[in-house]
Amino acid sequence: MAALAYRLWELKAEAGDPSFAEMSTRMGAAASKSSLAAAARGQVLPTWETTWEFVRVLAVDRLRQDAEEARREWRAHWERAASAAARSETTEGRTGHDETRAGPAEARTGHDETRAGPAEARAGHIETEVRMAEHPERRTRPPLARRPAMIAAVATAAAATGAALFSWLAPLSGKDEPTAPNTPARAASPYDDSAFERDVTHPDGTMVKTGAEFTKIWRIRNTGTIPWRGRYLTRLNDTPCRAPKRVEIHPVQPGEPVDIAVRVRASDSPGRCKIYWKMTDEAGTQLLSAKKPIFLDVVVG
C-alpha cells in the first residue's frame, strides 16, 4: 500500500500538485477529497474506483497520457498492493485464531472456579480467585476473613509508622485487591517515529543555475523511542537533476535531531526539479510507512 501511495504522490507532484479539493471539484474526479487524500496517505488500500479517479484526472486529463495505457499500468500497481494487503490480513488472522484457540489462562481459571464453588460463594469469590491466578505473589496475604482486624491494626499503627504503610494496606477494606509494593511499572512498547523540522538549505522553489552542483540539507528529529542505526535516505524517483540513489543517516538517539545532506547536480536545461526521498534500512526496506516522503524542489534556469 505504501508503494502505491508513493506513486500517487509522485503523479500528483508531476501534475502540478493540485489540492485534493481541486481534484474532486474543478478537475472532476468522481471521488470525495477525503477519499483521494486517504489513497495518497497509504494507511488503507483505496478502492480501484477511487484509485482510477485519482489517476484519471491527473495522468489522463492533465498530463494527456493515453487512457487505456494508464488504466492498465495503474491497475497492475493497484492489484499488487491489494495482494500484499490480503497476505498481511491472512497472516494476522491466522495469528489471532491460534491465540483464540489457546484461550487466556484467566478465562480458564474463572470457568473452573465457577463450576467448583457453591452458588452463594461464586458471586463473591470468582473475581478474587482469577486475580490470584494472575498474581500468584498475592496468595500469601491474609484471607478475607481477617481483613477487618488487619484494617483496625493498620489504622492504630498508622499514626506511629506513617501514612505510607497505611496507604498500602488500607485498600484491603474495599473490593479491589491491593497492589504489591514496589511493583515496577510496565514499560511502554518501543515505537519508531520522526518529525521534519526544516530545510536547512535550498527551500522549495529555490532558483539554481543549469549544470550547477549544490548540497541540499534537511533537518529531521527522532521522535520515537528506537535509536536510528544503519539507516539511509533513499531516492524514490528519477529526474533530469542527478543525485545519489541513497545517502547514509548517521546514528541518532531518540529525541535528537540530525541534518541529512545530499549532493545534487542541476539539469543542463531549464525546468523544475523535484526529487522524493524516503528513510530505509540497509536492505532498502522502507521505514515509517505512515510518513510522507521528504523532497527537494528547485527551479533550474
Image (cartoon, grey):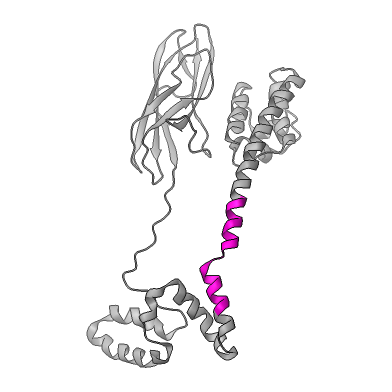
Residue 252 in percent (x, y) is at 34, 37
Left or right of residue 171, residue 56 in this image? right
Residue at image point 73% right, 37% down: 31
Magenta includes 15? no
- Vertical placement of residue 2 versus 241, above or below: below
Quarter of the figure with residue 82 = top right
Residue 65 in percent (x, y) is at 71, 17
Instruction: Give the main secondary structure of the magenta stretch.
Output: helix
Residue placed most toward the observer, 242 or 2 = 2
Left or right of residue 161, residue 200 in this image? right
Q: In the rendered structure, which segment of residues is drawn in magenta?
A: 93-112
- Vertical placement of residue 91 versus 69, above or below: below
Residue placed most toward the observer, 240 or 139 = 139
Left or right of residue 135, residue 118 in this image? right
Query: In this rendering, does residue 17 appear at all?
Result: no
- Which part of the image, by quadrant, shows the N terminus? top right
Query: In this rendering, does residue 190 appear at all?
Result: yes
Residue at image point 46% right, 12% down: 266
Residue at image point 71% right, 34% down: 24
Residue at image point 40% right, 24% down: 247
